[in-house]
Amino acid sequence: MRRFVHTDKMCGWMRKHYLLPLPELTDAFNQAFNVSRTKEEMNGFRKRLKLKTGRSGTFPKGNVPANKGKKGLKGANSGSFKKNHIPHNYQPIGTEVITTDGYIKIKIGHPRKWKHKHILVWEEHNGPVPKGHVIKFIDCNPLNCSIDNLMAITRSEHGVINRFFSGASPEYKDAVLQLARIKIAIRGIETKRQDQC
């Protein structure tokens, strides 16, 4: 495509009329010189002549917005929520739901404060969960949140049990926990020996 060459007369005309809005500028230029330039070409021509319109699209410093001090652009309308409106999906405190990963959660506060039921049961009987510990279901059923089915173990013990003994029966929980602790102790000794070498 051949580049359009602007004459001195066209450049003089542009310097005189460059502040017009781009659609009007394009139409006036095309009529004055009997050409068919697009808005993009006219904008490029204006930039090549280093003519700035001052229209950057940003608010000048110190500008006061038209809606300053107002809440929203309009007042309440027929679709607005009324005062003390309760949404259709509201759930009161104490509501129990089953999460997508199979655990029971209980709503403990507004607006969206939830906690796992097994942790609440543990804390009710034993106080806060110790730091670095998790609450494990003995029978691996996350819906069975009775205190007899819960035990607190360290995160490393939990990882070893899940990796090596995940299919163990609930009656072997103490043996499985002891085996996990033995594996962790062995790993600690091996790591210590490697560090000394």
Image (cartoon, rainbow, N blue to C red):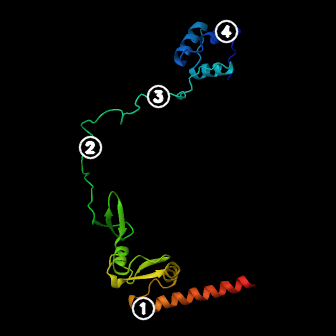
Q: Earlier in the sequence, mark 1 or mark 2?
A: 2
Asked whether 37 or 86 is in front, the reply is 86
Q: From the viewer's perspective, tell me whether residue 30 is left or right of residue 143.
A: right
Q: Quadrant of the C terminus?
A: bottom right
Residue 26, placed above or below residue 84: above
Which residue carries the number 1 mark? 172
Residue that appears at 61% across and 85% down: 187
* Amino acid at dot 4: Gly
Q: What SS does tag 1 mark?
A: helix
Which residue carries the number 4 mark? 12
Q: Are marks 3 and 4 in contact (CB under 8 Å)?
A: no
What is the tally of numbered marks visible in this picture? 4
Q: Earlier in the sequence, mark 3 or mark 4?
A: 4
Measured in 3D between alpha carbons, the distance from the residue under mark 3 to the one under mark 1, in whole angstroms, is 73 Å
* Amino acid at dot 2: Phe
Which residue carries the number 2 mark? 81
